[in-house]
Every structure is written in structure tokens, then in C-alpha cells.
Image (spheres, helix red, strand yellow):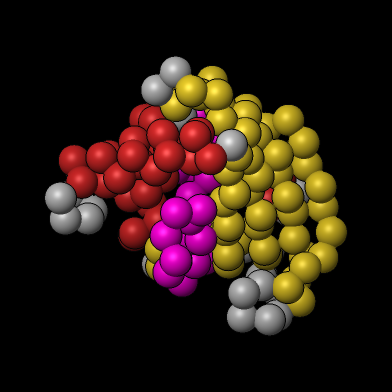
Amino acid sequence: MNAADRFRAAIEAGDFDAAVNEFTDDIRFFSPVKFTPFEGIDTVRALFRVLQRTFEEFRYVGDFPGRGRTPAGDETEAHVLHFRTVVNGKQVEGIDLIHLDAEDRISTFTVMIRPMSSLQVVSEAIHAGLVADGVVPG
């Protein structure tokens, strides 16, 4: 079982702490609404606390392993995890694109969401949660 598999198993078990433990300390999390990534384990851990509260009925419905290039251009083992969830009553579909480093840890994590109306609902809910937790200014 690799880091992507352990991450998925932890998320499906509702254990967000175990899921975040699969990240490198210098994790780069690419959001579908923010140009620059969230960087570092403390910031991404805070983001995942908000995600845990925000996503309802979250489930992975597909896993597509392979190889890919990180945003920095490094070729790595990669996984695309297809998910569905509900946010504030809105159906959301998306993918988590995960890149593993040489030590079998998650080094980059990119989220893509559709449709646009769902992305807007997710963006507003996540931003509100980050503000409420003091992670970003209001």
C-alpha cells in the first residue's frame, strides 16, 4: 500500500489526521480557486480541518494510478482519485491529483472541481472556514 492508498483509506475512514500524516512537511496544495498553492504541513493541515467540516457524504469513486510530472517538472508516481461530495446542499464532483516523492510521501496535491456552480459554493464555504479558523484574514 503506497501513500496515496493510505491517504484514501484514511479519508474514507474519516481519519483526517492520518490522511494529513501522508504529506511531506513541504507539501504544496493546489486549489482550484487560488493561483498560488497552499504551502507547508501546518497550512495544509489547517485547510484539511476545514475540508473535514465542509464536505458532506464525501466518497472516492475511482482511482487512476500512473506516472506524471509535478508542477516543478519532476516525474513521479501519481494517482488521480475521483470523488463526489455535497457542500451546502450542492452536488460536487472532482479529482484529487496526488504526486508521491521518492520516500513514498505525498509532495503535491491538486484539486479540480466541476461544475463551476459547485466550485463557487466550495470556494465560499472553504474561505469562510479558513477565516473562522484564523488561517486567512477576513
**Residue 69 lies in what quarter of the image?**
bottom right
Decide whether residue 49 is among the magenta residues: no
**Residue 52 lies in what quarter of the image?**
top left
Residue name at image x 41 percent, y 34 percent: 121
33 left or right of 53? right
Q: Position of residue 129 (x, y in %)?
A: 27, 39
Q: Position of residue 92 (x, y in %)?
A: 56, 30
Q: Position of residue 51 (x, y in %)?
A: 41, 38
36 left or right of 102? left
Residue name at image x 68 percent, y 51 percent: 4
Name the foreground residue: 31 vs 48: 31
93 left or right of 128? right
Residue segment shown in magenta: 11-36
The residue sitting at the front extreme is 117
Q: Is residue 61 above or below residue 107?
A: above
Q: Is residue 64 above or below residue 13?
A: below
